[in-house]
């Protein structure tokens, strides 16, 4: 790939350009557009064109693991994370396990009073209406792979609260990710989600740490990547236009749609390229009236455009 200009900034206050179909078949994935020449200008223009459909702010950062280069579009803008923030919460828990203050098989009592609202995702709540006792390992599976709001809140509590998670992030040098409120608090007021924000550049910094194995033991890193790879949400986002079988370790985030406005449709992750290298990508689509399907398709198309920068088929 030709050298990308580091930390390109681009305004994505873009207008609409027609409906995009997010349902990408295997045949469509294999017959995607001709690979780009991959200059910084080419990729920037491609991302700009793709993002126009949202009519709202889009934040993108993409980097090749092992390289210091990063291409960022609205890279320092604050975007509501929604469930993307379950990744740093999970990392903070695993760090404490490595330190010996917690154990994977440690049992945690979950009370019904800790359950998130009925409009929020929580299979844990749905399967255990009277409460439950689960191991930290089980809570991690629920929170990271299933994106369970209750499990995330319980893990935050076990970690020592939002302050402890933030302390962990600061110890990593991550200052562009804010973990402030619980899922329960977000569910009570849609404006609260804006307090839990990330910049695309900082999301990439966090993904680099996951990929490089810094801050976590090999066993904890292996578990985290496994949980991210087994993520059940967002099949039409980062994974949507990639070749079948591509390994993607990712974490999604989604808001509801109120009054036709979808405040957050996000996905960040590590994509394994055919040569074994990894591409880190973070895409945040915020405050759009284009609909969830269009927002997910934007993430898939931006990922595919970035993939084509490194993969020549």
Image (spheres, grey):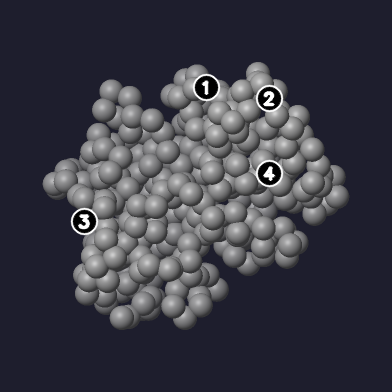
For label 3, the crowd category at 10 Å Cα-Cα, with few meaning under 14, some 14 to 19 and many 20 or more, is some
Report whether 268 appears left or right of 57. right
Q: Residue 185: tell me if it is visible.
A: yes
- The residue that label 3 is drawn on is 49
Estimate the x, y position of residue 143 in percent, counting from the top left: 59, 41
Q: Residue 44: tell me if it is visible.
A: no
Q: Quadrant of the C terminus?
A: bottom left
Q: Report, in whole angstroms, how far the alpha carbon at label 4 lies from the one at label 2.
A: 14 Å
Q: Report, in whole angstroms, how far the alpha carbon at label 1 lies from the one at label 2.
A: 14 Å
- Tell which circle, 1 or 2, labels the residue nearer the N-terminal end: 1
- The residue that label 4 is drawn on is 138
Q: Nearer the viewer, residue 261 or 140?
A: 140
Report whether 159 appears left or right of 87. right
- Tell which circle, 4 or 2, labels the residue nearer the N-terminal end: 2
Rendered residue at 44%/78% (across/down): 274
Q: Report, in whole angstroms, how far the alpha carbon at label 2 lies from the one at label 3.
A: 48 Å
- Tell which circle, 3 or 1, labels the residue nearer the N-terminal end: 3
Residue at the farthest right position = 100
Q: Are the two marked residues, 3 and 1, in contact with CB atoms closer than 8 angstroms?
A: no
Helix, strand or loop under label 1:
loop
Rendered residue at 26%/38% (across/down): 291
Rendered residue at 56%/28% (across/down): 126
Q: Report, in whole angstroms, how far the alpha carbon at label 3 lies from the one at label 4.
A: 42 Å
- The residue that label 2 is drawn on is 131
- The residue that label 1 is drawn on is 117
Estimate the x, y position of residue 294 in percent, counting from the top left: 25, 45
């Amino acid at each position: 790939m030709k050298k990308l200009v580091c930390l390109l900034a681009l305004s994505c206050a873009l207008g609409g350009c027609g409906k995009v179909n997010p349902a990408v078949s295997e045949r469509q994935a294999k017959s995607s557009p001709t690979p780009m020449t991959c200059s910084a200008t080419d990729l920037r223009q491609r991302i700009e064109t793709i993002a126009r459909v949202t009519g709202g702010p889009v934040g993108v950062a993409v980097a090749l693991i092992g390289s210091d280069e990063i291409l960022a579009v609205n890279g320092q803008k604050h975007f509501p994370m929604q469930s993307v923030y379950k990744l740093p919460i999970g990392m903070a828990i695993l760090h404490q396990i490595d330190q010996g203050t917690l154990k994977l098989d440690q049992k945690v009592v979950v009370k019904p009073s800790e359950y998130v609202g009925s409009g929020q995702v929580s299979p844990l709540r749905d399967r255990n209406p009277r409460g439950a006792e689960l191991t930290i390992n089980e809570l991690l599976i629920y929170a990271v792979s299933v994106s369970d709001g209750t499990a995330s809140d319980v893990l935050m509590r076990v970690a020592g609260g939002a302050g402890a998670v933030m302390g962990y992030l600061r110890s990593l040098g991550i200052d562009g990710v804010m973990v402030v409120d619980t899922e329960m608090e977000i569910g009570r007021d849609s404006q609260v989600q804006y307090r839990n924000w990330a910049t695309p550049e900082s999301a990439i910094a966090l993904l680099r740490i996951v990929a490089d194995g810094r801050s976590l033991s090999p066993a904890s890193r292996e578990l985290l990547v496994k949980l991210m790879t087994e993520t059940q949400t967002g099949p039409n986002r980062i994974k949507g236009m990639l070749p079948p079988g591509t390994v993607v370790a990712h974490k999604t985030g989604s808001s509801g749609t109120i009054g036709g406005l979808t405040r957050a449709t996000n996905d960040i992750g590590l994509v394994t390229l055919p040569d074994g290298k990894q591409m880190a990508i973070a895409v945040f689509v915020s405050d759009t009236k284009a609909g969830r399907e269009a927002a997910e398709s934007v993430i898939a198309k931006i990922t595919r455009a970035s993939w084509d920068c490194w993969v020549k088929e």
